[in-house]
Image: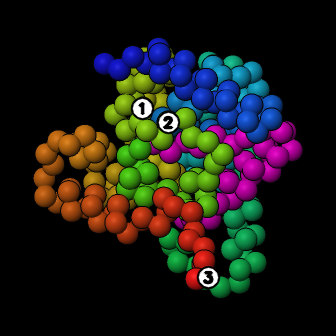
């Protein structure tokens, strides 16, 4: 097992360094009630006093049910602030303003981008930085919204696979329901991460760890990584000769 006590100290020091470099007073992060945001919130609270978590339900019933309950439980257990910003009306207004039918994928990506706008609005007002909540497994798959949940000022868990996130949360004593519930971004009714990606997290983590995975899983992982490469880099800028 990894030395999560030392890692906690090192990650907290990393967060404090990023805050000092930016002359920021604290951290803002999206509190979805899920595993990744739970770990980020705990680490940020160990690094500084001012931690603002923001729950941002948007259309999905899960957002208003277990996700909000788990977000509140996490904030209460670890002693950071929880604000709730309901984005359902904002999404509907944006769709109406666009004035034409959007594809299902485009609609699903509106919520993460509205959440990014919300987090940065609060962070700039409060003099804070936005903490990212993406793990290594999802980043490798490109399973995040470009300029949405992929946007942040720093990310303290980007090197951790999903299995490591769970192990770390158990070490830190996080609420069991957050660890045990099915991972879902809650972007639409019935959505789950693994079903949407078409591969199990265990296969992704195994692949990243150099373990054998079946041919179908390998093909899904490698194709996803290839077609989402643009998400992991800043846009290329033209440079004249």
Quadrant where the image shows the N terminus: top left
Taking the spot 74% from the left edge, 21% from the top edge, the residue there is: 49
Is residue 177 positioned above or below 228 on the image?
A: above
Kind of element beneath mark 2: loop
Q: CA distance from mark 2 to mark 3?
A: 37 Å
- Marks 1 and 3 close (CB-CB < 8 Å): no
Kind of element beneath mark 3: loop
Position of 223 with respect to 10 (left or right) is left
Prevailing secondary structure class for the magenta stretch in the rendered image: helix
Residue 157: give its label.
2
Residue range of the region highlighted in magenta in the rendering:
107-135
Residue 240: give its label.
3
Taking the spot 45% from the left edge, 47% from the top edge, the residue there is: 184
Residue in front for this viewpoint, 113 or 192: 113
Task: List the single residue furthest toward the right.
Answer: 125
Task: List the single residue furthest toward the front.
Answer: 241
Taking the spot 23% from the left edge, 47% from the top edge, the residue there is: 207
- Marks 2 and 1 close (CB-CB < 8 Å): yes
Instruction: Report which residue position mark 1 lands on.
Output: 165
**Dot 1, how many residues are within 10 Å of its Cα: few (below 14), some (14-19), or many (20+)?**
many
- Corner quadrant of residue 109: bottom right
Q: Is residue 112 magenta?
A: yes
- Corner quadrant of residue 130: top right
**Dot 2, how many residues are within 10 Å of its Cα: few (below 14), some (14-19), or many (20+)?**
many
Mark yes or no: residue 76 visible: no
Position of 120 with respect to 215 (left or right) is right
């Amino acid at each position: 097992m990894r030395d999560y006590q030392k890692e906690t100290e090192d990650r907290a020091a990393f967060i404090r360094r990023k805050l000092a470099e930016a002359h920021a007073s604290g951290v803002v992060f999206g509190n979805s009630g899920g595993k990744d945001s739970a770990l980020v919130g705990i680490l940020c609270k160990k690094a500084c006093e001012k931690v603002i978590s923001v729950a941002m339900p948007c259309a999905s019933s899960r957002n208003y049910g277990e996700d909000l309950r788990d977000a509140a439980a996490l904030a209460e257990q670890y002693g950071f602030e929880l604000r709730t910003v309901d984005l359902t009306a904002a999404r509907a207004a944006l769709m109406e303003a666009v004035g034409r039918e959007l594809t299902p994928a485009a609609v699903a990506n509106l919520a993460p981008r509205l959440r990014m706008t919300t987090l940065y609005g609060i962070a700039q007002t409060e003099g804070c930085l936005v903490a990212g909540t993406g793990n290594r497994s999802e980043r490798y798959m490109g399973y995040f919204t470009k300029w949405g949940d992929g946007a942040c000022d720093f990310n303290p868990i980007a090197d951790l696979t999903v299995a490591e996130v769970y192990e770390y949360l158990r070490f830190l004593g996080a609420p069991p329901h957050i660890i045990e519930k099915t991972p879902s971004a809650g972007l639409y009714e019935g959505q789950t991460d693994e079903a949407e990606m078409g591969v199990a997290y265990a296969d992704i983590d195994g692949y990243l760890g150099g373990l054998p995975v079946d041919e179908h899983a390998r093909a899904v992982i490698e194709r996803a990584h290839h077609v989402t490469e643009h998400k992991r880099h800043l846009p290329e800028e033209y440079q004249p000769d």
